[in-house]
Image (spheres, helix red, strand yellow):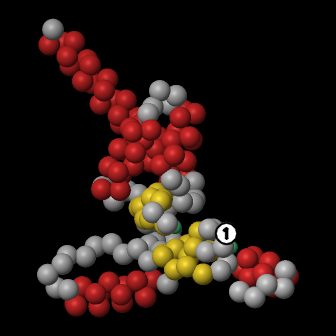
Amino acid sequence: MYYMILVTMYKKEYVHTNQREIILSYLKNNQGHFTASDVYAEVNKILPRISMATVYNVLRLLVKKGEIFSFHINDVELFEGGFYGVNGPHDHFVCSVCNTIDDVFVPDVRDYYIKKTSMAYPDKEMDKLSIVITGICKSCQKRGYENGKIR
Ligand SMILES: [Zn+2]
Ligand SMILES: [Zn+2]
């Protein structure tokens, strides 16, 4: 009896760890910004029995542990594995015409902003910063120009 319970627990934990590793490695090995359903669609190819709810729970856990980063654009939560990677923490530029998301790196601005804000609100402990800048990307600017549209 005891033995069976232990085996079941071990299996559960094993599967869970495996799911977590697969989801984490997908996000670490693929540059970009993914919704939970994007991640589900990819991970489902490797783990056909995984549910959307599990994928979401694992994503939340990874964000909480600081292994991945998430931010919202137009109320959609996006997950990213490379946030603390080679290029370090960054912010996002979103084209308001085509919704393309680009990473923008201005590290000294981030440091300055969080330092100043922490000083202004000393009662709050701040650890993460997420800036989303909207505008018009280069190719939309070009298209607008070619079509003779006034932006
Ligand atoms: Zn655009
Ligand atoms: Zn990014």
Residue shown at 53%/34% (left/top)? Answer: 44
- Whether residue 105 is visible here, answered yes or no, is no
Residue shown at 75%/76% (left/top)? Answer: 139
Residue shown at 33%/72% (left/top)? Answer: 128
**Quarter where residue 14 is shown:** top left
**Badge 1, how many Cα within 10 Å: few under 14, some, many 20+?**
few
Q: Label 1 CB, ligand 1: below 8 Å?
A: yes
- Whether residue 54 is visible here, answered yes or no, is yes
Q: Secondary structure at mark 1?
A: loop
Disc 1 residue type (three-letter): Cys
Residue 9 location (% of width, % of height):
24, 24
Q: Is residue 126 left or right of residue 42?
A: left
Q: Is residue 87 left or right of residue 145?
A: left
Assign the N terminus to one quadrant of the image: top left
Residue 145 location (% of width, % of height):
81, 85
Assign the C terminus to one quadrant of the image: bottom right
**Quarter where residue 99 is shown:** bottom right
User: Compared to 151, does 38 lie above or below?
Assistant: above
Residue 73 location (% of width, % of height):
49, 66
User: Compared to 26, does 70 lie above or below?
Assistant: below
Residue shown at 19%/12% (left/top)? Answer: 3
The residue closer to the viewer here, 142 or 48, is 142
Q: Is residue 95 left or right of residue 37?
A: right
User: Compared to 96, does 122 lie above or below?
Assistant: below
Q: Which residue is mark 1?
A: 98
Among all residues in the image, which is located at the extreme front?
Answer: 150
The residue closer to the viewer here, 149 or 31, is 149
Among all residues in the image, which is located at the extreme top?
Answer: 1
**Quadrant of the image where one finds ligand 1:** bottom right
